[in-house]
Amino acid sequence: MHIVLGIDGGGTSTTCLIADEKGNVLGRGVGGPSNFHVVGIDNAKKAILESVEDAKKNGEVTANKFDVACLGMAGGDRPKDREIIKKGVESLGVAEKIIVESDVLIAFLSAIPKGYGIVVISGTGSIAYGINRRGEKRRAGGWGYKLGDEGSGYYIGRRAITSILRERDGRSKSTRLTFRLKEYFGIEKIEEILNIVYEQGLKTKEIAALAPIVMKEAESGDEVSRGIVVDAAKELALLAKAVSKGLGMQHGSFEIALLGSVFKAGPVILDPLKKEIRNCIPNARMTLPSIEPVQGAVKIALKNLEMPNKK
């Protein structure tokens, strides 16, 4: 039996699926973050191997080396990054053949069954990616937390921190976020958050983890929190608009799949996002796919599986 690996390496966690030659899932595993730009290549390799071993354990799979492994990784569409990731994973010896693609491509393949449309991803980071009916491809965003990631969990979490500092200075309205973040971090004075961010080195995923707090306060009527969420929705809509315009799809009828942890907040983010998207792409249909992006990596691995010739 031929067995493949599909791996989705993200800024928060890494997911691995083990599947047979027919696509049947044999095991699923999870590891730590594997965006090597954030955690470094050694930690990324560790997380990938952790996810594979977890999948083997959960699926009671005994194989030590698989036929093909496809990894959907941040930066997987850039030649230099792809080479770094490929060499790193090859050194793990988990598969005979290693394929590295972008994390957004595997998400697209899992979420858009028709093969044309747009995916908007908002998790720790953010990006949009589309393919039109002619097979042309385009992306927007995905430039990382230092240069972009507008509308992401990191964006929302960072805005929460800056908002309580602005309130402290008297530069913005009062917000419940001040109480919630002081409680969350176990601090008495707002100024103490500087030590947490700068000296302790608050990680991107830890900042992104503040997004649910903002969502909850926005639902409860906190004006500042609501403003942050609406701004995030506008930024995500801009990503979709840029991709649709670049592909000549802005007046067409197609699916926009919304993927990532930010959308799990529900109507508080979805309602303003849908409103913004309808204003610029009126005929698009927004969906919330239940299929994991890692399934797209499995599809690519299976396509690259060298099967014996059938007579």
Image: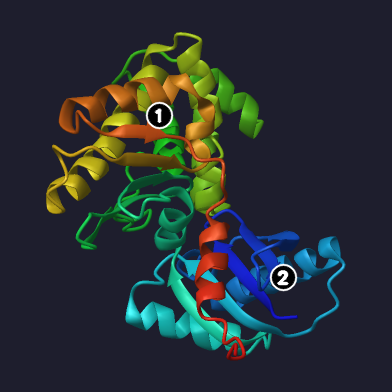
Q: Within 10 Å of the Cα at label 1, are there few (<14), some (14-19), or many (20+) other Cα atoms?
A: some
**In front: 82, or 161?**
82
Q: Residue at 58% x, 26% y: name it.
A: 182
Q: Residue at 41% x, 58% y: name it.
A: 104
SS state under label 1: helix
- Mark 2 or mark 1, which has the lower sequence index? 2
Q: Residue at 55% x, 83% y: name it.
A: 98
The quadrant of the picture occupied by the C terminus is bottom right
**Is residue 169 visible in the rendered structure shown here?**
no
Q: Within 10 Å of the Cα at label 2, are there few (<14), some (14-19), or many (20+) other Cα atoms?
A: many
Where is 56 relative to 84, above or below? above
Asked if residue 265 lies left or right of residue 54, the reply is left
Image-quadrant location for residue 29: bottom right
**Is residue 4 visible in the rendered structure shown here?**
yes
The alpha-carbon separation of the residues under discs 2 and 1 comes to 42 Å
Pinpoint residue 2: horizontal percent, then vertical percent: 70, 80
Pinpoint residue 232: horizontal percent, then vertical percent: 34, 32
Residue 198's disc number: none
Q: Residue furthest top?
A: 221
Where is 127 relative to 278, above or below? below
**In front: 220, or 120?**
120
Where is 74 relative to 64, above or below? above
Disc 1 marks which residue?
Answer: 165
Residue 52's disc number: 2
Pinpoint residue 147: horizontal percent, then vertical percent: 29, 55
Instruction: Name the kind of residue labelled 1 in the image.
Output: Leu
SS state under label 2: helix
User: Cβ–Cβ below 8 Å for labels 2 and 1?
Assistant: no
Where is 174 relative to 107, above or below? above
Pinpoint residue 110: horizontal percent, then vertical percent: 49, 54
Instruction: Name the kind of residue labelled 2 in the image.
Output: Val
